[in-house]
Image (tube, helix red, strand yellow):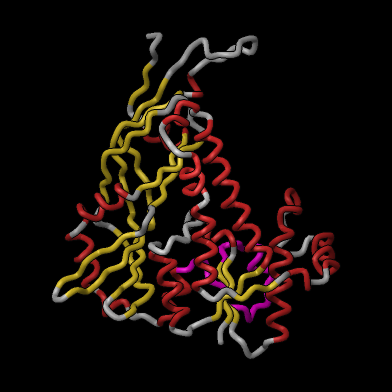
Amino acid sequence: MSMLFVDTCIFEKKGLNFDKENIIINALLDCYKNGKFKFYNLSVIDNEIKNHIKLRADKDLNTLKKFKWLKELIDYNDIEKKCYKDMEDYESFKKNIGAINCNVSEINPELVFKKYFSLEFPFENKKDKRSEFPDAFTSEYLNEIKTKNEQETIYFITDDEGLKKSLNPSIVVYKSIEEFLKELNGIDIKEYSFIKKLIIDNLSDISSNILARLNLKVSFMESEIIEPDGIILNNKFLFDVINVSGDEIYVSCVFSELTLTGEFSCLDYNNSYWPNDEDYYTYIQYIKANGIKYEDVELEFKIIKKDNDYLIEYNNIYNLDINFDILEENANESFSPYD
């Protein structure tokens, strides 16, 4: 049976979201249950994923603990459980997909160091070679497995070009889980042409449901006000049917434009003044926007046929980033309390 490996960066792009309600995770599990591949859990990738989940949970928990007045209102045990829920979801995912553990400790490190000193892939980046060691051990393991199992089909999902170039050419590489599932299932999109009309007819409901499940990741902002109140999706989009299971159709859409409406403002770093001999701003200016535009936004849905109708189900979370550069690009007003 075919062997599947998935790189850390792919799961990171999905927000390390292994919740059972995640559409992509559901589609992957469905294909596994239908015997289309065996999932291999490589130790170096497994450790990276767990470290990233733990760091994010620790950061969220420490942020909450700064607000001391919350102690009287909430149970920190409940908060801690929610912060580390992603780790529980990840362990459940591995169990449900029948993950086969494999360890890179079997790899001769001399092979990796040889590539390191000769600047072979994935060590092509001279400035940051040390960060490529996990990728190097991954490629050595995959290449060795392919040598020992020439007749087996090995799938690897990664968008790391350096890592891809270091692999045996007979290893089948995909850039995304969606691309892998679409080809694995051999789906003819012409059979599902009705989906485009279904999505266009339900754009308003889809927008409301995305907003209700929106997780805005705020970074590099100060004195920010982030209050989204709506989402506008345009009707220009591409979609792929990535899996079909009975009356359930798994769909991945890329909308050319998504606008997040509401009130958004933060400190304008470029026009606020902080003298070197002071520990505070002596002049403050803010930027403000009534909408934030995003391009080529990928959203996943599950379409379910029920009687003579179709229902749309959603992910548990949809992630969007917002930072100073994004807000500055969309700002339509600037103001200062000093003016």
Q: Residue at the location (51% across, 45% down)?
A: 80
Q: Residue at the location (24% across, 49% down)?
A: 208
> Residue 223: x, y in percent?
45, 24
Q: Is residue 300 above or below residue 214?
A: below
Task: Tell whether 305 sits left or right of 15.
Answer: left
Asked if residue 39 lies in the magenta stretch, the reply is no
> Residue 287: x, y in percent?
39, 25
Task: Tell whether 246 sits left or right of 128.
Answer: left
Q: Residue at the location (68% across, 66% down)?
A: 43
Which quadrant is the N terminus positioned in? bottom right
Q: Is residue 29 above or below residue 136?
A: below
> Residue 282: x, y in percent?
52, 10
Which quadrant is the C terminus positioned in? top left
Q: Residue furthest bottom?
A: 151
Q: Residue at the location (24% across, 66% down)?
A: 196
Task: Tell whether 127 sits left or right of 226.
Answer: right
Residue toward you, 88 or 8: 88
Asked if residue 168 lies in the magenta stretch, the reply is yes
Segment colored magenta? 158-177
